[in-house]
Image: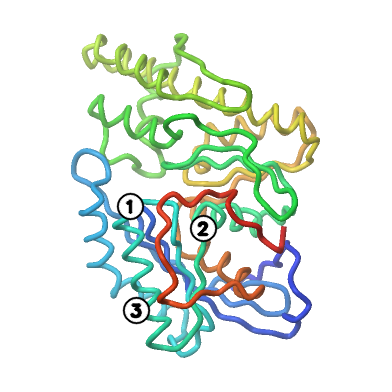
Amino acid sequence: MQKIPVPVKLPESVEGKEVTVLGIESTSHTLGVGVLRFSRGSVEILANISSQYRPEKGGIHPREASQHHMKNAPTVLREVLRKAGVSMRDINTVATAIGPGIGPCLRVGVTIARFLSKYFNIPLTPVNHAVAHIEIGKLFSGFNDPVIVYVSGGNTMVLVQKNSQYRVMGETLDIPLGNLFDTFTREIGIAPPYVVDGKHAIDVCAEWSQEFQPLPYTVKGNDLSFSGLLTAALKLAREANGGKESLGRICNSLRETAFNMLIEVSERVLALTNKKQLLLVGGVASNKVLRWKMETLTSIYNVKYYGTPPDVAGDNGVMIAYTGLLLYLYGRTSKPEETHVKQRYRIDEDAYPWL
C-alpha cells in the first residue's frame, strides 16, 4: 500500500519507531473504523471501513443512529482487522472521536474504545473530530500551513493555525452548509436519500435548471448566516407547487448563493493572512461545484489548492486513527475511565504541538 509522508513536525523520539493505530469514528450517521501504520516518517493506510445509518424519512434520529452503530460495530471491527491483516495485539493505541457530535452516537465509539483499551491494556487516545478532518486533509495534500475551509453537515468554518492552535477566522452563525442542503431537500420532498451516486440531492435538483434568482446573501465580516437563505428558498419552493423546472431554479440558486458566500469569506481570509495554500476539508468538500469554485478562487490568487479526496473527506475511521497517531507520538493519551464525551468540543479549545 502507498506510504504517505507525514507533513507535520514530529518529536525526535519517534525516529525508528513503528506504531499501529486503530481509529473509531461515531460522531454522527457514520460508524467508521480505520487502521494505519506509521514508520520512518510515513503512514500506510491498512484498512478503512464504514457503515452508515440512513433514515427512511426525516433527518438523523440520535437513538436510531446509535442503535445502528451498536449493532454494526462488531462486524465492522472484525472486518477492518481482517482487511488490515492485524490483530488487536498488534495495535499500539486505540483512538476515538470524543466530540463534537451527537451524544448517543459519540458514546458508542467512546465505550468501544474504553473496552478495547482496558481489555488489551493499550493506551487510549481521545481525538477532536473536527481536528481530524483537517489533519487527514493535510496528510493527503502535504500542506503544512494552509487556510482551511471546513464544510460538513455539522460545521462550516474558515480557519488558520497560529501559536499551536487552530484559530477560527469565520464560521456560520446558525446552521452549517451540509445541514442547509439536507434540510432544504428533505423539506421539499426529494430526500432522503441525501446522496446518490456521489451526488447530493441538491446537485441533482440543481441540474433541472440553469436559471438563477436572487436569494438572501448574509455575510457579516468573516461570518455567514444560512437560516434566512433556507427560509426564503423553502417559501419559494412551496409556492412553486413542486414543478421540476421551478424546483431546479431554486436549488441552483440556493447552492450558488451558499457557495458564493463561502467563497467570499475564504477570499477575505486569504487576502488577510497572505497564505499560499488553501485546503478544503469535511464531507461537503466532495461537492464538485464547490471544488471548482475553490480551484477558480485559488488560481486567481496564485495559491496552491487541495480538495480532500471523497473517500476520506466524509466521516471515517482513518482520519481519527491518523490524528490519534499524532497525539500518541506526543504522549497525549488518556485513561479509559477519564475519557469522556465532549458533545460541544470546539476546534479552538486545545493546543497541538505539531502546529
Residue 78: which disc? 3
Check disc 2: other Cα within 10 Å, few if <14, some if 14-19, many if 20+.
many
The circle on residue 29 is 1
Q: How many marks?
A: 3
Q: Position of residue 102 (x, y in %)?
A: 34, 51
Residue ID at (41%, 80%): 81
Q: Residue at x 44, y 30 (%)?
A: 174
Which numbered disc, 3 or 1, marks the residue closer to the eye? 1
Disc 3 residue type (three-letter): Arg
Q: Relative to 94, does residue 88 appear above or below in the rendering?
A: below
Q: For this rendering, which residue is in front, 279 or 25?
A: 25
Comes first in the chain, label 3 or label 1? 1
Residue 126 position in % (x across, y down):
50, 67
The mark found on residue 128 in the picture is 2
Q: Secondary structure at mark 3?
A: helix
Nearer to us in this view, 69 or 300: 69
